[in-house]
Amino acid sequence: MNRLLIMRHSKAEPSGIAVDFERELTPSGRKKAINACKKLTKKGCAVDFILSSSALRAKQTAEIVRDHFGVLNDIIFDEELYYISAAELVEYVQEIPLALKKMGKEYSSRAGVDNFSVMIVGHEPAVSGAAYKLLDNSAKIKPEVGFGLSTANIVNMKSELPWEEWTPESIQKANIIHVEC
């Protein structure tokens, strides 16, 4: 079963202090990212791959996740994830294996080649918008996702289908991992 974890970067310094792309995590943001990892661990989640926006706050969040989970694969920092729309992010999810191959990444997964866990660390409104588009209308969390994700919160989705076949009807389990500081 493939698992997709869509995470909004953790709490960053306010805009206006630095150029948006260079905003860093605050100390409470670092703590919040660590707490998110702890919650994922309690739910039995593993992370095989991390695809992250190349904005500094997303990079720092992804590095905390990598260090917590001992991710075997390099983080793929992709500037496209900074500018991406929700619809484009859905397409991005469906092309995960192709994207990894194009980047020359040999993937090793704890669960095997066809079943792996990918975390995407990105920004609002794309992260909640993509999660919303991937969820079936009957998903209990869909209305909440529609209001956006708070920093360091994660939408956790699972499907037995290959990535390229992910649609709202293919998601078998979904929940939100809420994180407090």
Image: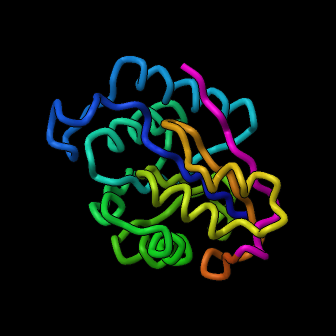
* Image position, residue 55 (x, y; %): 27, 48
User: Position of 16 compared to 80: left or right?
Assistant: left
* Image position, residue 152 (x, y; %): 51, 36
Q: Is residue 4 above or below residue 144?
A: below
Q: Is residue 61 above or below residue 133?
A: above
Q: Nearer the viewer, residue 40 or 73?
A: 40
In which quadrant is the C terminus drawn? top right
In which quadrant is the N terminus drawn? bottom right
Task: Residue at 44%, 66% (x, y): give it.
Answer: 106
User: Position of 87 compared to 81: left or right?
Assistant: right
Q: Is residue 136 magenta?
A: no
Task: Residue at 43%, 34% (x, y): give it.
Answer: 10
Q: Is residue 170 magenta?
A: yes
Q: How many marks?
A: 0
Q: Nearer the viewer, residue 60 or 29?
A: 29
Report the magenta residues as a range: 168-181
Q: Nearer the viewer, residue 73 or 11?
A: 11
* Image position, residue 151 (x, y; %): 48, 37
* Image position, residue 83 (x, y; %): 31, 63
Task: Residue at 67%, 58% (x, y): give it.
Answer: 3
